[in-house]
Amino acid sequence: MATPDFVLELRRHVGNAPLWMPGTTVVILRPAPGCAPIDWAEPIAPETVDMLCVRRSDNGAWTPVTGIVDPGEEPAVTAAREAAEEAAVDIEVRRLLSVEVVGPVTYDNGDVTTYLDVAFVGEWVSGEPRPADGENSETAFFRADQLPPMNDRFLRAVAKALSAEAAADFLTA
């Protein structure tokens, strides 16, 4: 996984000590072949849209696009940047889905990080997905009713993305 330079610099000072990091997740959708454009004001039937998934190089898991927010960067900007960097696609960020804490995550090298994840839904605009930066080994669109296995956090984000609910979700416990 490519680690941002600012994180490497922090790690130089704190070693493996726990870090609190801002992150983003973006559920990227496009109309499935033969289906109408997405009406973002209405619930989206999963059989009418494709979702972009990436297979992580580090653990082989299929996920939406994720990433770390750079210092001073808006999380929605991060979501679009990560889509371009990780999967070579351009997107339009449509709406905020959720805010939640993820972790702590302990990496193979002993680093410990807890993320404040800000999740969005985005609409694919252009680009043929491909693993663009080494963080992922595969990229593919899957129909939203035929997704590869994902953890509960990502499945909640997908369900929220398919809903027409404008209010963001957050956990209280």
Image (cartoon, grey):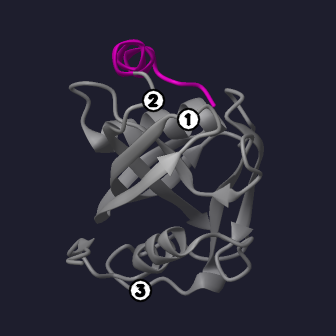
Residue at label 2?
A: 16
Question: Mark 1: which amino acid?
Answer: Gly
Whether residue 31 sits left or right of residue 143 in the image: it is left
| Magenta run includes residue 9 | yes
Residues at marks 3 and 1, CA–CA distance in whole angstroms: 42 Å
Question: Mark 3: which amino acid?
Answer: Pro
Q: Nearer the viewer, residue 33 or 25?
A: 25
Residue 173 x/y as whole percent: 24, 78
Residue at label 1?
A: 110
Q: Are marks 2 and 1 in contact (CB under 8 Å)?
A: yes
- For label 1, the SS is loop
- Say which of marks 3 and 2 sits in front: 2
Q: Label the magenta part by its dominant secondary structure.
A: helix
Residue at label 3?
A: 43
- For label 3, the SS is loop
Residues at marks 3 and 2, CA–CA distance in whole angstroms: 43 Å
Question: Vertical placement of 5 versus 16: above or below?
Answer: above
Residue occupying the point 40% across, 77% down: 160
| Magenta run includes residue 4 | yes
- For label 2, the SS is loop
The answer to which quarter of the image holds residue 57 is top right
